[in-house]
Amino acid sequence: MLNDQELLRYSRQILLQHVDIEGQLRLKNSRALIVGLGGLGSPVALYLAAAGVGELHLADFDTVDLTNLQRQIIHDTDSVGLSKVDSAIRRLSAINPEIQLVAHRRALDVDSLAAAVAAVDVVLDCSDNFSTREAVNAACVAAGKPLVSGAAIRLEGQLSVFDPRRAESPCYHCLYGHGSEAELTCSEAGVIGPLVGLVGSLQALEALKLLAGFGEPLVGRLLLIDALTTRFRELRVKRDPGCSVCGSHHG
């Protein structure tokens, strides 16, 4: 049940007929894995904690650098040099002491990633490199766990939800394959802060919809954001029956 403090804390959310008490209880009993606590992971973690997701699993092996602070809003100047996980735990505990926080401070290998994914209800990929995204996707397909994937570089953002519980849902590999372009990171190409905030906030929203059970998740759709002109486009994406990760021959 929800205690009096929780009823008050989440009252504006509970007022929504799509959430109500039942939805809030589902959030309280839910567990989410956030892979990466940078520009995308910052708003994801902040909003999921504030919304009352009962258990957040935080994965990042990096430390806070001064160059992070322009966009990674969960960290502050005093966090420079600290583990990003420890910095995030400090901030999230201050925002909502009601939730549980589970730390993954080391890089996840195949086995530890599989275990981390199996332990939660939804995974949010907030990483900044293709190999990690591929590994997270494969683990989610294998475990049958929904994946909320976001990306942002320069002035462009992308967002989609891959849900292996749905027969029609593609996976990340269906959409991106093995990657055709040389990888660029924010340190090489740059990125504007509010864009990663926007993409991360939308990732948090998609996760809340999946966990509380309301709305229409962004499954089978790719949202493209052009921050330069403030335009949004949506593309339909289909499952690839020959996909080496989620294809019928593979399952």
Image (cartoon, helix red, strand yellow):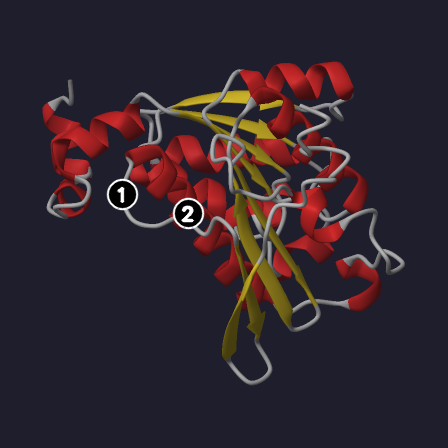
Query: Mark 1 packing: few (<14 Cα in 10 Å), some, or many (20+)?
Result: some
- Ranked by sequence position, the earlier of labels 1 and 2 is 2
Q: Nearer the viewer, residue 109 or 181?
A: 181
Residue 109's disc number: none
Q: Residue at x 37, y 38 (%)?
A: 210
Percent x, y for residue 101? 47, 23
Residue 38 against residue 27 in the figure, above or below: below
Q: Within the image, what quadrant is residue 51 found in?
A: top left
Instruction: Examine the rendering and report whether any part of residue 240 can be seen.
Output: yes
Q: Residue at x 52, y 27 (%)?
A: 145
Q: Which residue is mark 2?
A: 206
Residue 16 against residue 139 in the figure, above or below: below
Q: Which residue is mark 1?
A: 214
Q: CA distance from mark 1 to mark 2?
A: 10 Å
Residue 51 against residue 157 in the figure, above or below: above
| For residue 202, side relative to residue 42 (left or right) | left
For the residue marked with disc 1, what is the amino acid? Phe
